[in-house]
Image (cartoon, grey):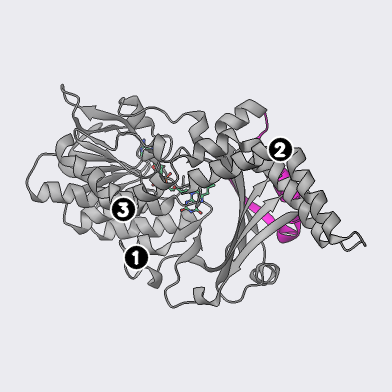
């Protein structure tokens, strides 16, 4: 056993763990961070869009040396059927600002840089160290961790669980349940390398401008899920994910979906001639507000994906992870400053502070969305994309058919596919879940 006792042990060096360890170390606490990967980021998968505001709160001058790819000037949303897409695009020169708001990043590089900042702030960071168990006293209070290293048990006043979506430690210690298959998506992602000029020509970009595409529709075969295409400097991140329960139900495979997505006539020209150098698969928490587990207890708090803090509607995860990590650390610091023990009562401050942040407010706003998307997946991901595509073709083809006839045909196709009550019901349910 390591005799030295720490103020806090942080398990995991992803976005949440790094934010927590950095904040604790910046405030002078004695911090040990444990990461099972060879280095911070070696196990982490993300699209990846980085939200600057949340990182700025941790490292205000991060733009000076962080490994950023492109700042985003354009967002595209595609509703796809098998041969077409209907797009909603927003592009603005306002995003070419001095301090851009969103960037694409490559997690393996970014997390390494982030981890260096954690070390510089004074935390002890041990990689290639898997925490195998939480150490608990006779009353169940968490008093430290056990690792796969020979020197075994390490003690601390509080343990920050930032172990990502699987959250095996927390579930093993009965602090929370394992995420259910209808509350997590399985996403697969590839990195397609191309010369920088090719990417810029294909996406209409100059300099470090970037664009991201979020795609939904028949590409997920009626399952609840989405695809994405993000432009980096010299590669394109491309992936797709659907609920695990939907994969179980349909027998579809993630590789099959990814393959079909890549061969789609709207996607194939963007990646034509590219060299695929990386392939990764990872889970994403998608249960939203109703899936959030107990966030604190005797001697522990849980942050980031391990706490299911992910906004699937807006495709935000890393910012919720960084914010929850920072807030947990600030709460711990306040408890410590008062010289109070790390009891559940005192650590409830973390939840109080998180409830006041955008993290919980946003997840609460969309609390009914995950269930709606799941139960209505056939309509939202299959029927409507096909109807919209046919309507667009009908609208755009100039073939001598009077416009009024065209409108009637489109209208009838919607009624035939969903019925009056179905259409009103879908609109009502969507509006209610969105409010
Ligand atoms: C394909 C994909 C695309 C995404 N795209 C985006 C995006 O564009 N923008 C966005 O904001 N979010 C995105 N997300 C979500 C985002 O990646 C997560 O929300 C975020 O990484 C969560 O951070 P975290 O620190 O909680 O978990 P992670 O980043 O998963 O970090 C957990 C860390 O804990 C370590 N660990 C686990 N168990 C142990 C243990 N027992 N001992 C020691 N270490 C351990 C792991 O090795 C890992 O380093 C995406 C996710 C996926 C899968």
Element on which disc 1 rests = helix
What residue do we see at 37% from left, 37% from top? 292
Residue 19 visible at all: yes
Q: Name the spot of residue 61 as percent of width and height, x first.
A: 34, 71
Q: Identify the residue shown where x is 51% and y is 55%.
A: 48
User: Mark 3 to mark 2: distance in Å?
Assistant: 41 Å
Nearest to N terminus: mark 3 or mark 2: 3
Local packing at callout 2 (Cα closer than 10 Å; few below 14, some 14-19, many 20+) is few
Badge 1: how crowded within 10 Å, few (<14), some, or many (20+)?
few
Whether residue 269 appears in magenta in the rendering, the answer is yes
Res. 343 in view:
no
Nearest to N terminus: mark 2 or mark 1? 1
- The residue pinned by badge 3 equals 357
Mark 1, mark 3: which one is toward the viewer?
3
* Residue 350, quarter of the rendered image: top left
Mark 1 — residue? 56
Choose top left, top right, bottom left or bottom right for residue 244. Answer: top right
Residue range corresponding to the magenta coloring: 251-280
Q: Nearer the viewer, residue 321 or 79?
A: 79
Left or right for 431, reference 144: right
Disc ID at residue 419 = 2
* Residue in the foreground of this view, choosing between 371 and 279: 371
Would you say the residues marked 2 and 1 are in contact, meaning their CB atoms lie under 8 Å apart? no
Question: Which mark's residue is nearer the viewer, 2 or 1?
Answer: 2
Residue 113 coordinates in the image, percent (x, y): 39, 60
């Amino acid at each position: 056993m390591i005799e030295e006792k720490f103020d806090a042990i942080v398990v995991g060096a992803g976005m949440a763990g790094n934010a927590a360890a950095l904040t604790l170390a910046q405030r002078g606490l004695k911090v040990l961070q444990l990461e099972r990967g060879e280095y911070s980021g070696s196990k982490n998968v993300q699209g990846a869009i980085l939200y600057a505001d949340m990182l700025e709160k941790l490292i205000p001058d991060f733009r000076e040396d962080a490994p950023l790819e492109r700042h985003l000037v354009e967002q595209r949303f595609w509703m796809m059927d098998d041969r077409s897409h209907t797009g909603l695009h927003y592009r603005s020169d306002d995003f070419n600002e001095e301090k851009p708001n969103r960037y694409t990043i490559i997690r393996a590089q970014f997390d390494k840089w982030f981890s260096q900042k954690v070390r510089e702030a004074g935390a002890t960071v041990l990689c290639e160290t898997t925490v195998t168990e939480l150490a608990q006293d006779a009353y169940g209070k968490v008093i430290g961790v056990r690792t796969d290293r020979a020197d075994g048990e390490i003690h601390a006043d509080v343990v920050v669980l930032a172990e990502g979506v699987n959250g095996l430690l927390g579930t093993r210690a009965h602090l929370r349940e394992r995420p259910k298959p209808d509350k997590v998506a399985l996403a697969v992602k590839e990195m397609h390398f191309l010369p920088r000029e090719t990417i810029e020509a294909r996406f209409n970009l100059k300099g470090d401008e970037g664009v991201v595409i979020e795609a939904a529709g028949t590409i997920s075969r009626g399952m609840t899920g989405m695809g994405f295409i993000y432009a980096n400097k010299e590669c394109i991140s491309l992936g797709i994910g659907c609920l695990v329960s939907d994969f179980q139900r349909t027998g579809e495979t993630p590789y099959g979906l990814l393959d079909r997505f890549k061969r789609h006539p709207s996607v194939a020209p963007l990646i034509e001639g590219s060299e695929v150098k990386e392939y990764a698969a990872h889970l994403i928490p998608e249960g939203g507000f109703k899936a959030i587990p107990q966030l604190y207890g005797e001697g522990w708090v849980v942050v980031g994906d391990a706490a299911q803090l992910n906004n699937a509607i807006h495709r935000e995860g890393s910012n919720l992870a960084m914010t929850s990590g920072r807030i947990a650390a600030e709460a711990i610091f306040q408890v410590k400053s008062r010289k109070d023990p790390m009891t559940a009562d005192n650590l409830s401050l973390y939840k109080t502070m998180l409830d006041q942040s955008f993290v919980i407010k946003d997840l609460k706003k969309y609390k009914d969305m995950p269930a709606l998307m799941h139960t209505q997946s056939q309509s939202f991901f299959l029927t409507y994309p096909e109807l919209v595509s046919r309507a667009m073709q009908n609208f755009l083809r100039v073939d001598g058919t009077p416009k009024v006839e065209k409108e009637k045909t489109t209208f009838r196709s919607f009624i035939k596919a969903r019925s009056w009550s179905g259409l009103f019901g879908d609109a009502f349910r969507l509006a209610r879940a969105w409010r």
